[in-house]
Image: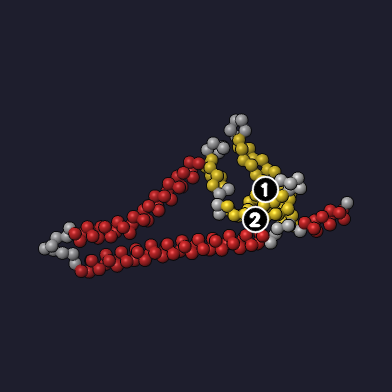
Amino acid sequence: MANAFNTITVDGVTYDAAAYAAQQATKASTEVKNDLDKDAFIKLLVTQLQYQDPLEPQENGEFIAQMAQFSSLEQMTNMATKLEDINNVVGNIDTSVLVGQLSAMIGQGVDWEETINTADEEGNPVTEKNEYSGVITGVTVKDGATKIIAETLDGQTYQVEIGEIASVYNLQNAIQNAIAEA
């Protein structure tokens, strides 16, 4: 049963604390394993050469095959690193495009819904939803999360996650329609 004491929120996403810890441990061990594979292979090869029987040395073909495997492993490692770099560049481009699109909305009206997950006295999960309306006054990027800054009619300022936005509209048209209906 999830409650405020056994959950963790990372980048706006709430996880079960135990499941998140297990996921991070698996991720960390995989990263360590990937780092050791290349070094472990070369150490094994050097040790094998160091302790081979001088009266019956390793066949040239076996040695060449092992060197080819090492070369392939190193190329794959380099390729994985380059793909990660490309992924970071694409992520930065995506963020820049999103910031540009959101910046074009400054001055527009916005409606959003904020969801608050808490627990009652018995530890049962309680979800509360609050609806807000305001004007987009800015855009912010913090810890990789892009948010709009919105100000409500009573002057309160909120940082709104993109997923919480219900609608964005032309504020002048909305005011004119409200006047026409009144």
Q: Residues within 10 Å of mark 2 (few under 14, many from 20)?
A: many
Q: Which residue reaches farthest left? A: 55
For marks 2 and 1, give the CA distance. Answer: 11 Å
Camera sees residue 120 = yes
Q: Measured from the top left, where is residue 90 in percent x and y?
A: 53, 63
Q: Amino acid at mark 1?
A: Tyr
Q: Measured from the top left, where is residue 144 in percent x and y?
A: 55, 54
Which residue is found at the position 76% from the left and 48% from the top? 153
Q: Measured from the top left, where is residue 56 in percent x and y?
A: 13, 63
Do callouts 2 and 1 mark residues in contact (Cβ within 8 Å)? no
Which residue is found at the position 62% from the left and 60% from the top? 98
Task: Specify whether 182 is left or right of 32.
Answer: right
Q: Where the N terminus falls, by quadrant? A: top right
Task: Specify whether 171 is left or right of 92.
Answer: right
Residue at mark 2: 139
Task: Specify whether 46 is left or right of 179.
Answer: left
Q: Which residue reaches farthest top? A: 121
Residue at mark 1: 158
Task: Specify whether 109 is left or right of 45.
Answer: right
Q: Quadrant of residue 125?
A: top right
